[in-house]
Structures are given as C-alpha cells and as structure tokens.
C-alpha cells in the first residue's frame, strides 16, 4: 500500500498570504516578485513547499477568494512571467509551490456568472439558482429557498430581480456557489488544475472543498434546518468523495502533494479524503482544535481556551487517523485565524511571549502528519494593537462588527470581540525588520503594521541563535533527521494536570535516531505536574523552550508555558 509517511513524513509546508508577505513595487500590497525575493529566507528556514493563497484575477472582496479568472494573475500581484520566474527560482531553492484552488464558488464578476445573469441557460446551470415566487419583486422577494446562513453573516441566498431567481452563496454575496452536480462545471475545474499543473507546480490546496456537494434535488426541496445554519446539509455532502476522486483522476494529480480545507468535518470523512487507497487528497485540514475557545461552537462569543478539550481533539484525530491510514495537516494558524500565541499563550511579557511562541510548534511539529507554518508565525508575530474599527479590512470582521451591534452589543463590546477574533489578526504584513514599514513595502501598506515590529522581526531573529525563528528551524531539522518523527506511532499520555498536553512517538525499527520520544507541553501560565519523572530521567533531552522544569515528588513539573521533549 502507498504510504504517506514515506512521501510526506519529512516535509514542512509554509503558507504565504501573498498580499501581506512582501511588496516589491511599492504599492503597499505584497506580490509574486516579493515572494521570489524572499526565497533565500525560506530555504534557510528549511521548508519544502509554499502554499500560496490566491493571486488570480479577482475583485478582492474576500482578498482573492473571490476568483473572476482562474487562469490569469491579478495585476495587483504581478504577471504570468513573474509567476513562471517564481516557479523556476523556487525549484532552484529546493522548494515546490502549492496553489490555492477556490472551487466551491466563483466571484460574481466571473464571466460564467455574468453570462448566467444575462439569462444564458448553459451558465445558469453552472450555479445554484432557485426560482423565486411568481409575485416576487426586488422590494419584496419573499422568503429565500432555505433559511441557511452565510458564513459571513445574513442569508446565503441573494435575489436577482431580472431572473426572478435566487442564487446560493455560502460566503459573501459576491461569491456564488458553483453547481458541482453539473459535469460541465467539474470538467472546467479539471482544466484549471491541469493548467497550473502544466506550469510546474508541486501541488494544490483546495479551499472549503468538503462543501462543494450540496444536497440532491433542487434547492426548493432542501429541508429547512430550524436548529442550525444549514451546514449539516452540505458539509461532507452526498457526492463529495466521488467528485474529488474524479477531479484528482481527471487532472492527473494523484501522488502530488494536496490538502483539502475541511470545514466542520469528521474523522471518518477525513480518513477517506486522505487515505492513499481512496485516491483523493494527501491530507486534510480540520478545525475542531481551533474552536476550543468558542462558546457553544460560536466564534463571535469570547471564551477561554479549554486545554482539556484541545488535548482530546489532538488525541482523537492523531490516533484515529493513524489507525486508518489518514494523514493530518498540523497547524495552529492560517490567514483565517488570530495569531495562536496571542490566543492560546500569553504575550504580555517578553519571556511569556517567547515561551508561548515556542510551546505551540513544539506541540504540533513532533506529531504525526505534515506541519504547516503560517507566515510570521516563525517570528512569533502577535495579533496587532489595532484600536479602531477603521483599521480592519476583512469583509467578515466588518460584517460581524455590525451584526454584533444589531444583536445588542455596544460599539465597544462589538469592537472587543472583533479585536480578538478578526481574521485580520494574522493578515498584517510580515515583520522583516525594525524600520518604519517593517521592510514590507516602501509605500503605504494596505493594512497597518503592528508597533511590535521593532522588537519582533526577521532581521533580528535570523541572526539570533536563541530566537523563535531559530527554534522553528531546529524543529524542522529534527523532523528531517528523525524517522520516529516522520513515521512513528503516536499515543497520547495522561498528564497529571489538565493544562498539560503530552504524547509519545515510537518507531521500533527506526533505521537511525531515537526509537521513542515523549513530548510534554504546559499550556498555562502556572507551573503544572506533567508525567512521572523516573523514566524520563533515562531519556536524553531533545527539545526545551526554557530550563524552567524540575523533578518534584517523582513528577516532572513544567514551569509556565514550558515545553520539553525527551528521546530514547
Ligand atoms: C476559506 C478561506 C477563506 C475564505 C473562504 C471562502 O475558508 O481560507 O479565507 O474566505 O474559504 O473562500
């Protein structure tokens, strides 16, 4: 049987959010040439692949996740020549590119949707349109076909008076859902994948791909969901595995590195998405572990991180995916999530910031799967110090600032929630150096630069062997050197404190390096008992983010935000 551990076990992926990575032409927006300029930095860090977020032609209502032309570069980000140069030079640096395919929806500016709006039946069948009542008007269109919510707030149906129809948009009103039940749509998407594959990329990330298959029948027949927001009807939908297998087979990408973004998914489905025998994808992103600070699953209600729940999610996803040959993408962060050290750690003092920023990757990089680093994470970048709603750009954040007030929050209360939860928290420019524009641009950055770039930046950290950056580099090296990290079994340990997450990795027939690792991470600002110390004393210390741990009454006690790994 094909085995992910041999092809992916030693790899690390770095995510680039293009508009915030590096600007090369002074317009304040990151671009493809900016990435090319920084390839040396990425090679030195040691990463294998770059997942590059969408740079295709787009009106940018959702920063490029609203694609108007899948096979052209948006001039804002450069030209096709810039792209070809990036592929070539990345390869020369030993780095492969993974492109972001946004196939659940297109921008309403896409030619297909424009033709649908003009009434062309071929293109009407490309989207999820539903008839409105015969007497519907622009002023009073009546009830939408279902009561489902858009992920960005409000109904996920928009009425088009000229057609007397509604169209489905699970995201923004300018992102119309494609009709994957139409074979012509699926074949168009195959052609897009082939186009980029032929340009020499190494793989793909598929955006919200477990939402592409909607319930069978016409929208008017879809059962209303009176309890939820509709997601149970289209998450891991009826034909999703069949459609993915077809896409992968027809575009010839089985065996390339691929990852699917799987929203609200299950382990059972992710085994199917990522088990090599199913010929779907190499691995999956799941998000349950990033909802442990939501209240009742609600993103826009603030809660404290529940470390016991976090441990349970890691344990079940790690152990069950391994038992059934699934493969996890390992991550804390991306362009949709706040900075994890601000969220799961403590950035209030320099020491707690450094420890938290190193604790998080210690926990994930030694797990079974493929680690993803989101740009700036390797520097310990934090949520920005924004103080006014005018500093935010993200469509979801701005919508919810209003919705929270409509629901009765004061402007201050709504701002506080957006400040903690906004996707813009991770979208501020990469902090390259301590100068005014942080080395990101010579112009006016499209979004503000956090004040802490004077102390948290690449120039200082690359030169410092004790920096967060050097720590990440060390973790990447460990994965490359140690078969037990690449392909060992994983087993979660019962720690004494519920603030501690601990696990072991074992590989009996490791060709070299240790056969066993034990990792223990204290996710709290207080000392916590982790594991019995007796046996650990015989192991050799492999990783530590501080020396604040000790033996006490036969126990290993970890100081605040302390993470350690021992090897045998
Ligand atoms: C994914 C992307 C996110 C985008 C959404 C709609 O979740 O990561 O940024 O807004 O899909 O395309």
Image: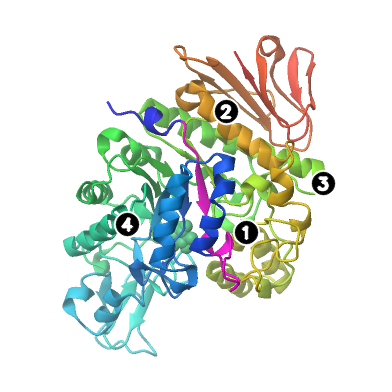
Label 2 vs label 4: CA separation? 32 Å
Q: Main secondary structure of the magenta part?
A: loop
Q: Name the mark nearer the viewer: 3 or 2.
A: 2
Q: Which residue is mark 3?
A: 349
Q: Which residue is mark 4?
A: 196
Label 1 vs label 2: CA separation? 33 Å
Q: Quadrant of the C terminus?
A: top right
Element on which disc 2 rests: helix
Q: Which residue is mark 1?
A: 421
Residue stretch in magenta: 10-30
Element on which disc 4 rests: helix
Element on which disc 1 rests: helix
Residue 199, picture quadrant: bottom left
Q: Is residue 159 left or right of residue 418?
A: left
Residue 174, image x and y in percent? 41, 75
Residue 71, image x and y in percent? 32, 66
- Does label 3 or label 4 sit earlier along the sequence? 4
Residue 66, picture quadrant: bottom left
- Does label 3 or label 1 sit earlier along the sequence? 3
Residue 206, image x and y in percent? 37, 53
Q: Name the mark nearer the viewer: 3 or 4.
A: 4
Q: Is residue 485 left or right of residue 382?
A: left
CB-based contact (under 8 Å), mark 3 and mark 1 = no
Q: Residue at x 76, y 48 (%)?
A: 347
- Does label 3 or label 2 sit earlier along the sequence? 3
User: Does residue 355 appear anywhere in the picture?
Assistant: yes
Q: Which residue is mark 2?
A: 478
Q: Is residue 400 above or below residue 377?
A: below
């Amino acid at each position: 049987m094909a085995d992910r551990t041999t092809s992916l076990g030693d790899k690390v992926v770095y995510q680039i959010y293009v508009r915030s990575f590096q600007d090369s032409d002074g317009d304040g927006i990151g671009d493809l040439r900016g990435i090319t300029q920084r390839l040396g930095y990425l090679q030195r860090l040691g990463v294998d692949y770059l997942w590059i977020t969408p740079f295709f032609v787009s009106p940018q209502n959702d920063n490029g996740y609203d694609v108007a032309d899948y096979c052209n570069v948006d001039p804002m980000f450069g030209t096709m020549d810039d792209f070809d140069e990036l592929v070539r030079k990345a390869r020369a640096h030993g780095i492969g590119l993974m492109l972001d395919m946004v196939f659940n929806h297109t921008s309403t500016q896409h030619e297909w949707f424009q033709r649908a709006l003009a009434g062309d039946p071929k293109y009407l069948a490309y989207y999820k349109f539903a008839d409105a009542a015969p007497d519907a008007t622009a002023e009073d269109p009546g009830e939408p076909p279902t009561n489902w919510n858009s992920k960005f707030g409000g109904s996920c149906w928009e009425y088009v008076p000229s057609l007397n129809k509604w169209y489905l948009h699970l995201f923004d009103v300018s992102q119309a859902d494609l009709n994957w039940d139409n074979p012509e749509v699926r074949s168009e998407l195959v052609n897009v994948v082939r186009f980029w594959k032929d340009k020499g990329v190494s793989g793909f990330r598929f955006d919200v791909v477990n939402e592409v298959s909607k319930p069978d029948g016409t929208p008017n027949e879809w059962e209303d969901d009176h309890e939820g927001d509709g997601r149970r009807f289209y998450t891991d939908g009826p034909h999703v595995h069949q459609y993915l297998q077809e896409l992968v087979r027809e575009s010839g990408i089985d065996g390339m590195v691929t990852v699917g973004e799987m929203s609200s998914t299950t382990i059972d489905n992710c085994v199917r998405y990522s088990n090599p025998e199913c010929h779907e994808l190499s691995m999956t992103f799941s998000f349950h572990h990033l909802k442990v600070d939501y209240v009742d699953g609600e993103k826009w209600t603030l809660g404290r991180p529940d470390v016991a729940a976090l441990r349970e999610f890691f344990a079940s996803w790690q152990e069950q995916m391994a038992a059934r040959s699934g493969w996890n993408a390992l991550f804390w962060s991306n362009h949709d999530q706040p900075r994890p050290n601000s969220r799961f750690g403590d950035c209030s003092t320099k020491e707690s910031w450094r420890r938290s920023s190193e604790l998080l990757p210690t926990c994930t990089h030694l797990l079974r799967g493929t680690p993803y680093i989101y740009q700036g994470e390797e520097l310990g970048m934090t949520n920005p110090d924004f103080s006014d709603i005018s500093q935010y750009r993200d469509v979801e954040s701005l919508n919810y600032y209003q919705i929270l007030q409509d629901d009765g929050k004061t402007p201050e209360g709504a701002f506080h929630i957006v400040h903690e939860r906004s996707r813009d928290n991770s979208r501020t420019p990469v902090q390259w150096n301590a100068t005014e524009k942080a080395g990101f641009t010579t112009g006016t950055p499209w979004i503000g630069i956090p004040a802490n770039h004077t102390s948290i930046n690449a120039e200082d950290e690359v030169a410092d062997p004790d920096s967060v950056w050097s720590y990440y580099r060390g973790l990447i090296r460990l994965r490359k050197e140690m078969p037990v990290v690449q392909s060992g079994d994983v087993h979660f340990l019962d720690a004494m404190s519920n603030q501690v997450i601990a696990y072991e990795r074992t590989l009996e027939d490791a060709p070299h390096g240790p056969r066993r690792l034990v990792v223990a991470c204290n996710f709290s600002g207080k000392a916590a008992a982790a594991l019995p110390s007796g046996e650990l004393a015989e192991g050799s210390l492999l990783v530590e983010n501080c020396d604040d741990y000790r033996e006490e009454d036969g126990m290993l006690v970890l100081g605040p935000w302390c993470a350690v790994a021992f090897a045998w």
